[in-house]
Amino acid sequence: MSTHIFLQGEAGQIEVFVDCPTQIKAIALVTHPHPLMGGNPQHKVPQLMTEILLQQGCLIWRPSFRGMGQSQGEHDQGIGESRDIALLSLALQQQYPDLPFVAGGFSFGAHVWAKSFHLLESGKRPQKLLLAGLPCGEVRGAIDYQTPDIDSDILLVHGEQDDICQLQDVIKWAKPQRHPITIMPGANHFFTGYLKSLSIVIERYFRF
């Protein structure tokens, strides 16, 4: 069962759900989808990431973004949220300095992680980073997500029929960096009906 902790961020307290295995082999920080569109730490995709990481012996932190749950502050379009995640990453690694650090994010949470990655020094960045449903470019004609390049070991997972974050935009972002993409044929943005397939991919990536 998850426990709660509260840490201080630049916009006030940050609510963090903590999941701890019997034996801790690694640490992880998992981020959730857009808080203004129903995203929260209990969403099925970050929850799936958490369950798999827990089985692998990871202690996981799942923060609530600004204005969500008991986290203070207001939604900041991923800018302030990225600083929060970088801050939490350092705090988590300070508590467990000798353990491998990995991370994962879904949708808006993946975008935040892509930005947070550049706010951390190279030695403090996740050794492995899972980005599922990563928004790149214009999303539903409303928001233009400028996703920075990532020079690291990452796993991109995307639904072929994603009508929120277009697959072609992710390919366009990944191509010059030569990042591989795992495509779920027929899957939508939320991987509806594909969670079993998604779990297999995540398990293969996160092994300690």
Image (cartoon, rainbow, N blue to C red):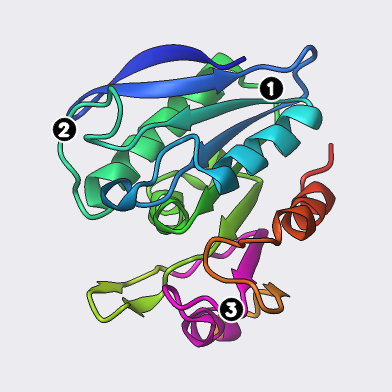
Per the image, the residue denoted by label 3 is 177
Amino acid under disc 3: Gln
The percent position of residue 63, horizontal first and vertical second, equals 42, 31
Q: Which is nearer the N-term, disc 3 or disc 1?
A: 1
Magenta range is 149-175
- Counting other residues with Cα less than 10 Å from the Cα at mark 1, is it few (<14), some (14-19), or many (20 or more)? few
Image location (x, y in percent) of residue 21: 73, 17
Classify the position of the C terminus by image quarter: top right
Q: Is residue 138 above or below residue 61?
A: below
Residue type pointed to by label 1: Asp
Q: Is mark 2 on a helix, strand or loop?
A: loop
On the image, numbered disc 2 is attached to which residue? Answer: 73
Q: Which is closer to the viewer, label 3 or label 2? A: 2
Residue shown at 58% from the left, 48% from the top: 45
Residue found at x 70% / y 33%: 51
The residue where tag 1 is placed is 98
The mark closer to the camera, 1 or 2, is 2
The front one of 190 and 172 is 190
* Residue situated in front as seen by the camera: 206 or 47: 47
Residue 61 drawn at (x, y percent): 53, 27
Residue 102, picture quadrant: top right
Magenta stretch encompasses residue 151: yes
Q: Between marks 3 and 2, how big is the CA–CA gap? A: 35 Å
User: Which mark is first along the chain, 2 or 3?
Assistant: 2
Apparent side of residue 133 relative to residue 9 in the rendered image (left or right): right
